[in-house]
Amino acid sequence: MSTRRGARRRADASGPPDADAGTEALPGAGREAVTAADARHVGGELGRAVVTADPALSDEVVRGLAEVTGRPLGTGDGARVHIGPGLPELAEGERLLWMHSTWAGVDGLLGSRSPWPREVLLTRTVGRMGERIGQYVLGWALADCQNIAGFLRQHQGRVWHRLPTESAEGTTAVIFGTGAVGAAVAAALQCCGMSTVGVARSTRTRPGFDRVIAMDSMGETGGAGGMGGMKAADAPEDGAAADGEAADDGPVAEALARARFVINALPLTPATTGLFGPRLFAAMEGALFMNVGRGESVDTVALGEALRADRLRGAVLDVLPDEPVPATSELWDLPRTVLTSHSAGVTTDEDVLTDFRAAWRSLSQGEPPALAVDPGAGY
């Protein structure tokens, strides 16, 4: 009988386990079929399962997990249920039944075991991440409208001069990703009278958004890696976008041209890798770009070119392709840009326990957990 809490294995080098960026579950097909089958299988084995936790998790989380499962961690003679940021080390003959990630982003986990075994359920932790990221985005948006950076510079120079400011009411925010986090960001911005436009795979209505448009509708103006058109490696053949000219018009391009703020809140998948490239940035006309999704979704070279060409008002980057960003990185020198060390959506102990408890309850009742991951979709 094992009494291990689990062996830690880092699953994602893009950020610390307590600060994984929020990710959005965009509309997709096949999810119910996957999670329903997992729920029946996993739920029937929970009674004998050996539940373990990553050694880095706090004593409070360990005690809470024991309370949820009704037994000390590491006891039992069945398959393994593990809670942590990465996959556990399995003993010979041991079988993993269910992996509950303490992070919202699971691209690192899926990448560490590809293809993901169909018989292993994967769930994730979101908690109140959407609320926190919404406040983060709102804070930077209001700071930009009120010219906080300009006033700070004046203060340092002991200068008394009235600077131009503007109201957030009536401005437009385009948010890529309409899942729980994207919806929370939209709701926060709406509180200040902003118009919110969501970009997703389909145009289904989502809370917090005034309207939702499909990424496919951008056609040839899609970024270097549109969600339904070009792949991440594709580049404009005629070089127009690289010269700062937008390609064919479409609903997404039109929205970007009017946007005061553009926010990425997408998960990292093959379709979203490099999504924000020359073509998407060329469609923007003075927006403040914020990335609270995943660093690899942004072509930082194209971002720098857009900033220097004044296609963008500025950028706030909470996630970067390689973290931590070294002091020697040129990213620190991007004009009108702030890096915030992957801190927008901190995951708390309460988040982990709340989401694991909900998943355990659903599985015990033979139902798929709300935060079950579809490995094929990547979220």
Image: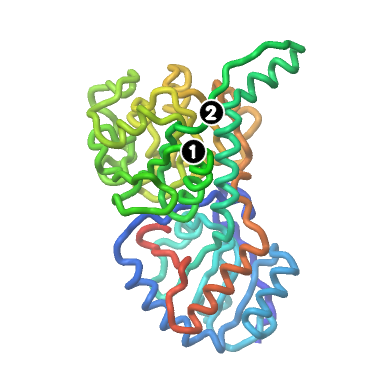
Name the residue located 58 percent from the left edge and 33 percent from the top edge: 142
Q: How many residues crowd around disc 2 within 10 Å: few (fewer than 14), some, or many (20 or more)?
A: few
Viewed as shown, does residue 10 lie left or right of 247?
Answer: right
Viewed as shown, does residue 103 lie left or right of 304?
Answer: right
229 versus 205 height, above or below: above
190 versus 164 height, above or below: below
The picture quadrant where one finds residue 157 is top right
Viewed as shown, does residue 115 lie left or right of 80?
Answer: left
Residues marked 2 and 1 touching at CB (< 8 Å): yes
Q: Alpha-carbon distance for marks 2 and 1? A: 9 Å
Secondary structure, mark 2, is loop
Closer to us: 292 or 330: 292
Name the residue located 63 percent from the left edge and 27 percent from the top edge: 328
Residue position marked by numbered label 2 in the rendering: 167
Q: Position of residue 287 (x, y in %)?
A: 45, 27
Name the residue located 69 percent from the left edge and 69 percent from the top edge: 61
What's the amino acid at mark 2? Answer: Ser
Secondary structure, mark 1, is loop
Q: Where is residue 169 in the image (x, y as percent from the top left)?
A: 49, 33
Q: Position of residue 114 (x, y in %)?
A: 41, 61
- Counting labels gives 2
